[in-house]
Image (cartoon, helix red, strand yellow):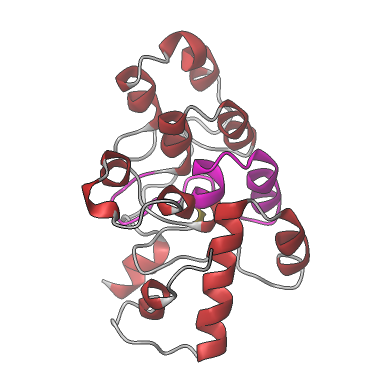
Amino acid sequence: MTRDPSPIRAMDGSGSSSLSPEAVALAARMFDAARAGDMPIFEQALPAGLPPNMTNDKGDTLLINSCLADAPDNRGNAHVCLFGLAQLMLAAYHGHADLVRLLVRHGADPNRLNDRGQSPLAGAVFKKEDAVIEALLEGGADPDYGNPSALQCVAMFKQEERWQASFEAAPGRGKAQQQPPGGAAAASNA
């Protein structure tokens, strides 16, 4: 299923596209591929220079974006209120642990927040994607980072017994740099 590329047109924050139609189409294809867990596309695109932290107009990365894959009108869905869109977020939210590992290996930031301050790790907790949670923790995700943090999501969704010890011992715990929602690009546009 091909997504409408219009949300990607405003990636520069201006509301209009400074990207060529080809670049917009490529970005839409990459977000669709993250949503679908299409490893072969990323195995080619990342070494060729695809930015692993590519974001859409909401500041969502490829790790987040998968949350809206099946929602034709996402405004009324509770999961969309909690989690936004991205490549790493998309892959995480849709349970594509191998793609999450590949994106992180190529430099995707496991702590990159969307415009709502949400992390890929919190999205994976929400979706109960255990393999993705493990991949993100191995990749340096900070369970204390974001709003709500993944640690808060664990409590909210009554998963403390499963994740509390792993989150407390996470190698990335407390190491995420405070950034505005949407990442460093949002700070430079402010």
Q: Is residue 50 left or right of residue 189?
A: right
Figure quadrant of residue 43: bottom right
Q: Is residue 113 magenta?
A: yes
Q: Position of residue 6 (x, y in %)?
A: 38, 77
Please state, as top left, top right, bottom left or bottom right, where the N terminus lies in the image. bottom right
Q: Is residue 86 above or below residue 99?
A: below
**Residue 124 visible in the current orientation:** yes
100 relative to 156, above or below: below
- Quadrant the C terminus occupies: bottom left
Q: Residue at x 52, y 68 (%)?
A: 2
Q: Is residue 125 magenta?
A: no
Which residue occupies 31% across, 74% down? Answer: 189
Tell me where residue 60 appears, x and y as whole percent. Answer: 42, 58
Span shown in magenta:
89-118
Residue 98 horizontal/vertical position (percent): 70, 42
| Residue at x-position 38% and y-position 87% | 17
Residue 143 visible in the current orientation: no
Work out whether 68 lies above or below 190: above
Residue 21, percent across and down?
Answer: 51, 89
Q: Is residue 50 above or below residue 174?
A: below
